[in-house]
Image (tube, rainbow, N blue to C red):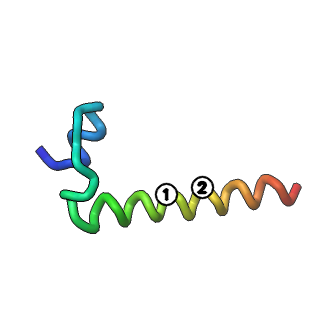
């Protein structure tokens, strides 16, 4: 079971153990979230 699968099942996981995969996904999600918030504030 990968660290992401553990996370999705709400089990204990080590985000640092998964290498760049989980870190890259979290960074992309953070960027999308900030982009979304900026677009909502411009209205």
Residue 7 vs residue 31: left or right?
Answer: left
User: Which residue sits at x=31%, y=58%?
Assistant: 22
Percent position of residue 27, x then y: 45, 63
- Dot 2 lies on which element? helix
Identify whether 17 is placed above or below 6. Answer: below
Residue occupying the far right of the picture? 43
Percent position of residue 24, x then y: 37, 66
Quadrant hosting residue 33: bottom right
Residue 37 vs residue 5: left or right?
Answer: right
Q: Are marks 2 and 1 in contact (CB under 8 Å)?
A: yes
Q: The C terminus appears in which quarter of the rendering? A: bottom right
How far is mark 2 from mark 1, CA to CA?
A: 6 Å
Disc 1 marks which residue? 29
Disc 2 marks which residue? 33
Identify whether 21 is placed above or below 14. Answer: below
Disc 2 residue crowd, few under 14, some 14–19, many 20+, Cα 10 Å: few
Disc 1 residue crowd, few under 14, some 14–19, many 20+, Cα 10 Å: few
User: Which residue sits at x=66%, y=62%?
Assistant: 35
């Amino acid at each position: 079971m990968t660290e992401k699968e553990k996370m999705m099942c709400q089990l204990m996981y080590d985000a640092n153990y998964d290498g760049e995969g989980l870190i890259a996904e979290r960074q992309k999600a953070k960027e999308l979230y900030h982009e979304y918030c900026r677009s909502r504030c411009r209205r």
